[in-house]
Amino acid sequence: MEVFKKLVSILSSEFDKYLMEHPEVSQEIPKNALLVFQLEGSNEFNEWSKELSRKYQEKEQPLLFVYIKGLKPSLSRLIEPKLEKVV
């Protein structure tokens, strides 16, 4: 379950970045919607995510499923790192 919590945190953060790059997509999200992330090929995570959303969904709150094919490898944003060995 801790792995799923970490994964939903990553997906949420990445989706937020995606919305910043594609603001037109945010127009499709109903006000006060509860986002439910579904990751292709991860049935156990997807079921966990659905169950969690049912637990926290408020009355009349819209659910919005966000289907994600996967994540690209993250790249380092470091600029010219240098190592120094200290004896």
Image: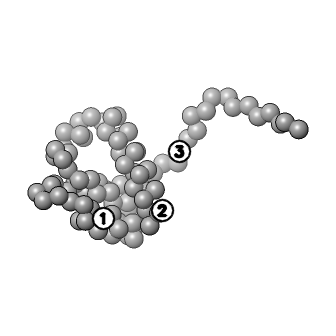
Task: Identify the element where label 3 is drawn.
Answer: loop
Which quadrant does the C terminus fall into? top right
Task: Identify the element where label 2 is drawn.
Answer: helix
Q: Position of residue 69 (x, y in %)?
A: 38, 56
**Relative to 74, is 18 on the left or the right?**
left
Mark closest to the chain's N terminus, 2 or 3: 2
Residue 3 is tagged as 2
Q: Give amino acid for label 1.
A: Leu
Mark closest to the chain's N terminus, 2 or 1: 2
Q: Nearer the viewer, residue 42 or 47?
A: 47
Contact (CB < 8 A) between labels 2 and 1? no
**Relative to 52, is 64 on the left or the right?**
left
Q: Residue furthest top?
A: 80
Residue 24 is tagged as none
Q: Residue at x 41, y 51 (%)?
A: 9
Q: Residue furthest right?
A: 87
Residue 86 appearing in the image: yes
Contact (CB < 8 A) between labels 3 and 1? no
Task: Identify the element where label 1 is drawn.
Answer: helix
Q: CA distance from mark 2 to mark 3?
A: 18 Å
Q: Residue at x 12, y 59 (%)?
A: 59
Q: Residue at x 80, y 33 (%)?
A: 84
Residue 65 lies in quadrant: bottom left
Mark 3 lies on residue: 74
Mark 1 lies on residue: 52
Residue 4 vs 79, above or below: the answer is below
